[in-house]
Image: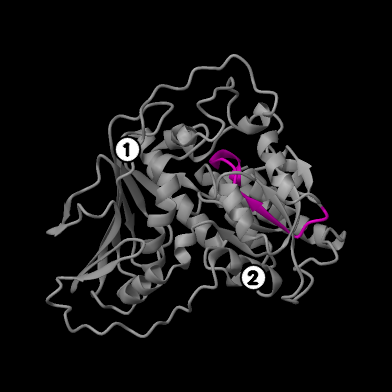
C-alpha cells in the first residue's frame, strides 16, 4: 500500500472514530461540542503541568481543571495543591482520552506533543498544544489531517502566542495591503545559539519521583540523565527528543511571514550549516525555502524565505543594519522593505515612507491567545487563527529545514505524497520509528 493510500485510509478511519466517539456519548454533559453556551465552563485536562505547562494552566484556569498529568510526581503534587479536586495521571495516553473531559492542554517535550494531540482529537477533545505541534513532518501531517477529519467540530490552537499581538497584526496588514509592493523575499533570524556540549552522561539511578520511561515515551530508549530532566532545556537540541532552535523559535518567527504572505507548502528546501551531527542540533543553521506563486496579490508572489540562527545570524541585509535585532523579520518588496520583530515595525527607507498612512486595521484585536481557543471551544471551533490546519502546515514547513540539514542536500518537496522526490534518504527523518507501545498512535 502506498503512503498516499495510507493517509487516505487514515483520514477515513479518524472520521469514523470521531463519529463513533460522538455516538457513544464520550462527551461530558457540559461538552462544548454539544453546546453553544459561552457561560458553561470546559472540563480541561492538563498534560505537562510545570514550567511552560504552568503558564498555560494559569491561562486556562477560568475553566474547570479536572485532570493533571505529568511524569514528575513533584510537579504533579505542586499542581495538585492548586487544583485539589483534579485527578492525577502519569501517562499522557490515559489523560488524553478521558471520557469526562472536554478539552486538553499539551505542554510536554516536543517528541510527545503529537501522540497526546492525536489521541485527544480522536477522542473528540478540543486541544491547545505548545509549539512545535509535532516532532516530525509525518506527525505534523497526521495532526493536521486528524483535525481536518473532524470537519471543524473541534477547537484547536498551537501555542504561538505572539500571533495574538497587535504588532504582528499590523505587519500582516501592511504586507497584504501592498505597502512595500510585491514581496519576493523574506528573511527571518534568531541569535539564540545551540550548545554543543556532549550528550549528558547517565546518572546513577532514576529518582523515585520520576517516571523516566514515560518521559522517554516514543523516543529511542536511553538511560536517565539529569541533563535531560528536570527543568533542563538542553533536551531540545537532541534530535531524538527536540527540534532545536528552528523548531522552537521558528514557530514564533516564521509564523509572521507565513501568515502575512499566505504561505502554503514549499516546492524546495535547502540548508547551509556545518556538517550534521547524528545526535545534536548545529551551532548555526541557515535554510532557504522556495515557494511557488499563490495568487495575484502582493503577498502571493513566488517567494524565497530564508532562516538564520545561532552564529549565522546576519548583521546587514539589503543595506539595513539589523545588528540591534536579536530576532527579526525583513520583508523585501519591489517598493520597499519592512523590518519587524515582536514589538517593532519599520518601513524602509524611512524618508520614502515619511508621509505614509497605514491602512485601517482589518484584523480584529485579539482577546488573548488562550482565550481565543476557549471561546472557540464554546461557540465557533473554526475561529482560532493558529488552528491545526494552519499550524500543521507551518510546522511541516519548518521541520523540512531540519531534514535538509541532516541529509546535506536540497530537497524537492512533493507535499501531496509527503516525500522529498530527489533524496530517498530523507525518509529516515520525515518519519520515525516509535518505541514499543507507542507505534500505533501515529499511523
Left or right placement of residue 44 versus residue 269 in this view: right
Quadrant holding the N terminus? top right
333 over 197 or under it: above or below:
below
115 over 200 or under it: above or below:
below
- In terms of image quadrants, where is residue 255? bottom left
Which residue is under mark 1? 409
> Residue 376 got which mark?
2
Secondary structure under badge 1?
Answer: loop
Q: CA distance from mark 1 to mark 2?
A: 42 Å
Quadrant holding the C terminus? top right
Please give the name of the residue rendered at 41% of the width and 71% of the height, measured from the top-left corner: 166
> Residue 85 got which mark?
none
Please give the name of the residue rendered at 42% of the width and 55% of the height, measured from the top-left corner: 252
- In terms of image quadrants, where is residue 244? top left
Residue 404 is at least partly visible in this image: yes
Residue segment shown in magenta: 99-113
Residue closest to the eye, 347 or 207: 207
Please give the name of the residue rendered at 18% of the width and 84% of the height, measured from the top-left corner: 355
Amino acid at each position: 500500500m502506498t503512503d498516499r493510500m495510507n493517509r487516505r485510509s487514515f483520514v477515513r478511519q479518524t472520521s469514523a472514530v470521531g463519529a463513533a466517539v460522538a455516538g457513544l456519548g464520550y462527551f461530558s454533559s457540559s461538552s462544548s461540542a454539544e453546546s453553544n453556551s459561552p457561560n458553561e465552563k470546559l472540563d480541561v485536562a492538563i498534560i505537562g503541568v510545570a514550567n511552560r505547562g504552568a503558564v498555560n494552566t494559569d491561562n486556562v484556569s477560568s475553566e474547570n481543571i479536572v485532570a493533571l498529568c505529568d511524569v514528575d510526581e513533584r510537579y504533579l503534587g505542586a499542581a495538585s495543591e492548586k487544583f485539589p479536586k483534579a485527578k492525577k495521571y502519569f501517562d499522557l495516553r490515559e489523560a488524553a482520552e478521558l471520557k469526562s473531559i472536554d478539552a486538553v492542554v499539551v505542554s510536554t517535550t516536543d517528541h510527545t506533543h503529537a501522540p497526546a494531540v492525536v489521541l485527544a482529537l480522536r477522542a473528540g477533545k478540543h486541544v491547545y498544544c505548545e509549539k512545535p505541534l509535532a516532532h516530525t513532518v509525518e506527525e505534523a501531517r497526521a495532526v493536521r489531517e486528524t483535525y481536518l477529519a473532524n470537519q471543524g467540530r473541534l477547537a484547536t490552537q498551537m501555542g504561538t502566542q505572539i500571533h495574538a499581538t497587535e504588532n504582528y497584526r499590523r505587519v500582516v496588514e501592511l504586507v497584504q495591503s501592498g505597502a512595500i509592493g510585491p514581496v519576493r523575499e523574506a528573511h527571518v533570524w534568531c541569535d539564540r545559539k545551540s550548545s554543543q556540549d556532549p550528550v549528558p552522561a547517565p546518572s546513577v539511578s532514576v529518582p523515585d519521583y520520576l517516571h523516566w520511561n514515560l518521559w522517554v515515551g516514543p523516543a529511542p530508549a536511553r538511560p536517565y540523565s539529569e541533563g535531560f530532566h528536570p527543568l533542563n532545556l538542553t533536551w531540545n537540541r537532541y534530535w531524538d527528543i527536540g527540534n532545536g532552535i528552528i523548531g522552537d523559535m521558528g514557530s514564533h518567527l516564521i509564523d509572521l511571514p507565513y501568515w502575512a504572505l499566505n504561505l502554503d507548502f514549499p516546492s524546495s528546501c535547502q540548508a547551509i550549516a556545518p556538517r550534521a551531527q547524528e545526535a545534536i542540533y548545529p551551532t548555526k543553521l541557515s535554510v532557504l525555502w522556495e515557494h511557488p506563486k499563490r495568487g495575484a496579490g502582493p503577498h502571493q508572489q513566488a517567494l524565497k524565505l530564508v532562516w538564520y540562527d545561532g552564529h549565522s545570524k546576519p548583521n546587514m541585509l539589503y543595506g539595513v543594519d539589523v545588528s540591534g535585532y536579536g530576532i527579526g523579520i525583513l520583508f523585501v518588496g519591489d517598493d520597499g522593505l519592512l523590518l519587524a520583530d515582536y514589538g517593532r515595525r519599520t518601513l524602509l527607507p524611512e524618508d520614502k515612507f515619511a508621509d505614509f498612512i497605514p491602512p485601517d486595521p482589518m484584523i480584529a484585536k485579539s482577546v488573548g491567545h488562550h482565550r481565543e481557543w476557549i471561546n472557540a471551544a464554546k461557540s465557533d471551533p473554526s475561529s482560532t487563527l493558529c488552528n491545526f490546519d494552519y499550524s500543521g502546515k507551518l510546522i511541516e514547513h519548518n521541520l523540512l529545514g531540519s531534514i535538509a540539514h541532516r541529509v546535506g542536500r536540497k530537497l524537492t518537496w512533493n507535499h501531496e505524497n509527503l516525500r522529498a522526490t530527489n533524496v530517498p534518504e530523507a525518509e529516515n527523518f520525515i518519519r520515525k520509528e516509535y518505541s514499543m507501545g507507542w507505534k500505533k498512535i501515529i499511523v
